[in-house]
Amino acid sequence: MHSLRARLTLVNLALLALGIVAATVVSLMGMRHYLLDSVDSELIASRNALQGAGLTRKQIDSLSAIGALREQFEPDKTGASTLPPPETILVALDAKGSPISFAGVAPTERQRGLAAAVDDPAALTRSDEMAELSLGGDPYRTTGARLGDGTYILMATNTEAVRDGVKKALRFDLAFGTVLLALLALLTMLGAQHRLRPLEDMVETASSIAEGDLTRRVPAGRDRVTEIEQLRVALNSMLHQVESAFETREHSAAQLRRFVADASHELRTPLSAIRGYLQLYDKGMLREPAERTRALARMNAEADRMGRLVDELLTLARLDQQPQLRMSPVDLSRLVRDAADDLRAQQPQRPLAVRADGSMIVQGDESGLRQVVGNLLANVRAHTPAEARVRVELARGNDEGGGRGGGGDRGGGGGGTVWLRVEDEGPGMSPEDADRIFDRFFRAVGGTESVETASGETDGPGGARPVGSGLGMAIVQAVVASHGGRVTVRTAPGEGLVVMVALPADARTIGP
């Protein structure tokens, strides 16, 4: 298995090698064609000079004719010679094509070989194309001329120099191409290492995440490439979502474990109390009627407490499943007034101010919203002294101005939100407890006062244990969230608690 860097290098080398081979072939063919064309031009010039002179072989044999021929073949003013180059072989042929003496010199062995290699001398004299011959292993370019008496003159020029030049050029191209390929391989490896560094960072990041470090992210490179940068951004976004999902799962798992532990503890407490009283009764230790009456009352109270706890757990379970609510227009001010009347009946001595004038219509489930208002006031009743002042306000607006002194609409105009504000002057809460107020089974213990429960026990701020199951505010938040609203709190030790509930207003909201 090859690395991506090696594959890129091999691909670049293969492409460059093909380019070098193609360029070498084209250049060598062009070079050979140019050199052979130069040789052919000299041969054609010599042939035209011989044929144009109109001499016969006998005239050429005579000394005077030779002298005249030399003068005629002197270089012209342009410097071009009409004589064949020194590498040229000349041989005279008679009408039958047999070699004969020329200029008083008998034909040599190489001249006879040239004559034997040419089948049709007359065709060479009529054609401008050169014939390719091989004499003694050497390449020759051959043409022919016809003298005035019908004698044929064959001229062949050695092209070994051309072949040597092409070979030298080929060796040079191969050497230069090899150096170029090696240089390209080095540059490609370095460039690929630089360009693929972001991918290596991604591999390192993925390995670190696989080992458990979910906070790792792919760093941004200095030389950003569009595609790699897009991949980096997408990968970091995915890693962020994975980390968030993992944290959410861990948080949910921790909440579930704490919920199960708290639920088990809360259910075990009343069961233990009921079991204890039953054991006392079974052993005959409750002899007096008053003792039996008190034990029966305590068992009934614990059974009621356990029943309320189970009902609240079922309510939260249903809300967690996001059930389909029975939505209808609900007058929130009516629910507030009803809950306030319940609080006055339970604690007549408590100072209670209610500002819920006019209709405040919201779209919601009436039973759920009634439970929200009831839980908020029950929380005040259970966790604040009986003489602590309570204010309940409803207002319409787009901000927290729906509460006291906020400047929101009070019965007039049409805001997009209905605000329910419940404020008490109780002992308040610490910031740490306020952060956990919506946690299930969370109950803050504090204050100096006490309240009486239905069973006659001392609970609440001054008692031995906090009253309630610790699910009331969790239910409030879940119900409000299912209606598309939100709940916020503001508190400090000794400054009371302010709970603000924001619910979307119904389009049919009307003023007072």
Image (cartoon, rainbow, N blue to C red):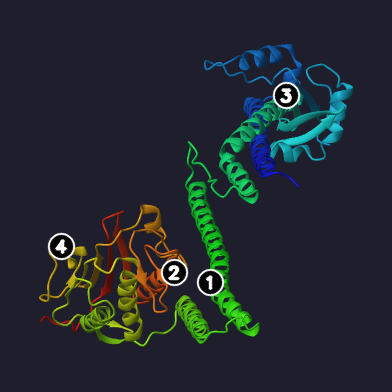
Alpha carbon distance from label 1 to label 3: 99 Å
Q: Is residue 426 above or below residue 12?
A: below
- The reply, left or right, for residue 351 in relation to residue 497 is left
Q: Looking at the picture, tell me which residue is in the foreground, 381 or 151.
A: 381
For mark 3, what is the residue? 168
> In which quadrant of the rendered view does residue 350 lie?
bottom left
For mark 4, what is the residue? 406
Circle 2: residue type: Gly
Q: Is residue 311 above or below residue 22?
A: below
Q: Looking at the picture, tell me which residue is in the foreground, 216 or 311.
A: 311
Circle 3: residue type: Lys
Label 1 vs label 3, nearer the camera:
1
Q: State the residue at coordinates (49%, 47%).
A: 229
For mark 2, what is the residue? 470
> In which quadrant of the rendered view does residue 283 lie?
bottom right
Number of the label disc, if any, that sits on residue 266: 1
- The reply, left or right, for residue 326 in relation to residue 319 is left
Q: State the residue at coordinates (36%, 53%).
A: 431
Q: Is residue 154 above or below residue 475?
A: above
